[in-house]
Structures are given as C-alpha cells and as structure tokens.
C-alpha cells in the first residue's frame, strides 16, 4: 500500500496594536516595546503538503526540500527570504529533518500561501504566515510539538510571530516576542483603512529614533478597556508611539486619522508601523457608516471585529 501525501491548511488572522509604546533602542539595534495586540478578521491561508512517507520521528535519517508558491500578490518574496520558507526550514530542522536542495528522491514539503493581509502594512502579515507554516508543518509531519515549543521557535523568526501562533489578545514586551494572553470581554468593531503603498518597518523605527523620546506611556487603561469590553474607554486610550514617525514619513496618514475622528469614530490610530489606519466604532452599524465615508481616502477599506481568535488548522 502506498502512503498518501498529507496536507493541512492553516487560516491565520492579522493583528492591530491597540497600544504600542517604544521604550528605547537597544545596543543591538532592536527596540524595546510594550504593546497590546489583538487579532482582526483579515486572514491569510498557508497550505502545507508533504511527500508520502516523510514524517517526524521516522527511525531513519530524514531530509526534505521546501518548495514555495503564492497567489501572485506584489511585494512578497518568492524564495528563501519568504517567512514561510524560513519557518518551514526552522521547524524541519527542529524535527530532525535536514532541509536540503531539491533533487531526485528527495522528499518534498510544498508550502502554498494565499494572502489577504496587506503586505508591509503594520498588520503582521509575514509574521502570521510564519506562524501558520510552523503549525501546518508540525501537523502534517506529525511533529507532536506543543504550542509552547512552537512559540519558542516562533520567537527566532520575528517579533510578532509568537503572538500570531496563539492570536486573541496579548501583551507583548521585550522586542515583542515575550507574550502573555490578556483577558478580553466582548467584541470590538473596527474599520481598517489600507494603502497599496507599503511602509517599511525599519524605516519607521529609524524615523522614531530621531523623534523626542516619548513619555513612558502605560497600558493600564487599554487593559481595563479590553478586560471590561468598553469601546468608549478603548477608543479614548488607543496609543501608538510609532505614529509620529509614520506621520513624518507619510503626512497623509495624520489626515486619515483626523478624518475618522471628525466622522465620529470612538478612536483612530496607525496600526503598528503603518500605513494601515484603524478606527474604532461603537457597533457594527457605526463601523459600516464610518467605512462608507472612508472609502475615498484609502485603497481598501474593511469592516471587521476583534479579537478574531487564533490560527485554525484543517487537515485536507
Ligand atoms: P509588522 O506589522 O510585523 O511590522 P508588516 O505587516 O508591516 O509587519 P509584512 O507584511 O510582514 O509587514 O511584510 C514585511 C516585509 O517582509 C515585506 O516587505 C516582505 O518583503 C517580507 N516578507 C517576507 N515574507 C513575507 C510574507 N510571507 N508575507 C509578507 N511579507 C513577507
């Protein structure tokens, strides 16, 4: 009997930062953060398929080549620089399978990415894809690695990747890799205003380095707002230290935030390093109303809710 190739698809949500404070630049160039992240209902899909017979915990020496493809979205690397490929190599090595070049008789791991999360938009798209790949490869190869272990692998790949493994609502510190789940009651309604023109995260941090150091903002009010499910309080306490740097690089983002506030949003903020601008609404009808007014100011506008749960895995 021939063994059937196994495959799995992970659907993974984007994030917004409802609070982001930069505590300073470290000697190694990374920045110390305190941030509260929530998943929102915009998703990528990562499908992983492995050659028959390729399994973690196989008694004999294993090797595999990683093959990557995506749906043609602009700005996503096709090769080993894609976070999906990096994540696949990382977990293969962890499972005792050598990632090697393709060749005759070399088992394959095929990774296919379908993107809906905008690229370089401050919504952790690449990090979400990396997290999804770790989870999918672990499932397909029967790796048996638990969430905690996957999160430690995730921390090697980038600051938002551990959060993307679990999703929901979390407080992240350090460079963003140390995460703790935060209690969140209720559902928040958002309008997400997206731009087709990306903003590179390193450029935003570089611009932040030239700004006056901010006051040491604390996340207490935001934590209370999510804990009690209070949209007015959350709207009042949304905060992002990087926003001033994003405004310096893209002054029209300041106008976009102001326009949401003039239209009656409970709060509006740049998400992460931008250029995505999010606005908090009182309820779904209010969100649709704000979105209708915002359409001409953005390349894409979505109405969604948070928290949007975590990645979901389906065996195909
Ligand atoms: P963050 O919010 O975590 O700062 P972001 O949403 O601003 O991230 P990403 O969409 O993750 O940005 O893309 C950042 C860069 O990562 C892109 O310019 C792209 O070249 C690279 N990249 C690598 N892999 C991926 C991927 N799977 N999807 C998107 N970008 C990727």
Image (tube, grey):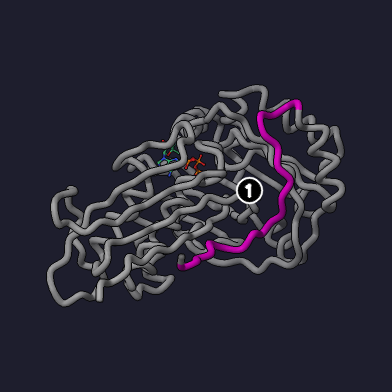
Q: Which residue is mark 1?
A: 217
Left or right of 94, for residue 259: right
Percent across and percent down for residue 57 are: 23, 75
Q: Is residue 56 left or right of residue 312?
A: left
Of residues 217 and 231, the one drawn nearer to the viewer in this rendering = 231
Q: Nearer the viewer, residue 180 or 299?
A: 299
Tell me the magenta residue range: 296-315
Q: Is residue 60 visible?
A: yes
Picture layout, residue 24 above or below residue 203: below
Residue drawn at (38%, 58%), measured in percent from left and top?
48
Given residues 38 and 285, the one toward you in this image is 285
Residue lying at 26% horizontally and 65% vertically, measured from the top left:
94
Left or right of 62? Residue 293 is right
Q: Secondary structure at mark 1?
A: loop
**Residue in the picture at 64% in, 59% down:** 308
x and y, in percent, of residue 110 in the image: 33, 53
Say if the magenta span includes residue 30. no
Tell me where residue 243 sits by quadrant: top right
Where residue 280 appears, as percent x and y from the top left, is: 76, 47
Q: Quadrant of residue 144?
A: bottom left
């Amino acid at each position: 009997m021939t063994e059937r190739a196994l495959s799995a698809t992970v659907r993974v949500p984007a994030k917004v930062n409802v609070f982001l404070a930069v505590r300073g630049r470290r000697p190694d160039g990374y920045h110390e953060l305190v941030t509260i992240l929530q998943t929102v209902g915009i998703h990528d899909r990562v499908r992983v398929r492995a050659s028959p017979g390729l399994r973690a915990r196989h008694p004999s020496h294993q090797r595999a080549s990683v093959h990557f493809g995506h749906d043609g979205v602009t700005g996503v690397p096709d090769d080993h620089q894609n976070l999906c490929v990096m994540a696949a190599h990382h977990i293969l090595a962890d499972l005792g399978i050598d990632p090697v070049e393709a060749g005759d008789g070399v088992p394959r791991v095929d990774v296919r990415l379908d993107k809906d999360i905008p690229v370089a938009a401050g919504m952790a798209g690449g990090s979400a894809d990396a997290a999804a790949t770790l989870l999918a490869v672990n499932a397909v190869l029967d790796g048996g690695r638990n969430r905690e272990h996957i999160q430690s692998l995730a921390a090697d790949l980038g600051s938002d990747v551990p959060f993307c493994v679990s999703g929901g609502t979390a407080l992240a510190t350090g460079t963003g890799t140390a995460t703790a789940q935060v209690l969140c009651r209720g559902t928040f309604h958002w309008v997400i205003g997206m731009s087709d023109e990306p903003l590179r995260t390193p450029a935003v941090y570089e611009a932040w380095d030239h700004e006056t150091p901010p006051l040491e903002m604390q996340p207490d009010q935001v934590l209370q707002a999510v804990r009690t499910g209070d949209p007015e309080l959350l709207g009042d306490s949304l905060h992002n230290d990087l926003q001033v740097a994003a405004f310096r690089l893209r002054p029209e983002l300041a106008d976009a935030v102001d326009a949401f506030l003039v239209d009656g949003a409970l709060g509006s903020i740049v998400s992460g390093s931008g250029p995505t601008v999010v606005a908090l609404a009182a309820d779904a009808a209010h969100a649709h109303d704000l979105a209708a007014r915002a359409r001409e100011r953005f390349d894409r506008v979505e109405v969604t809710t948070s928290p949007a749960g975590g990645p979901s895995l389906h065996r195909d």
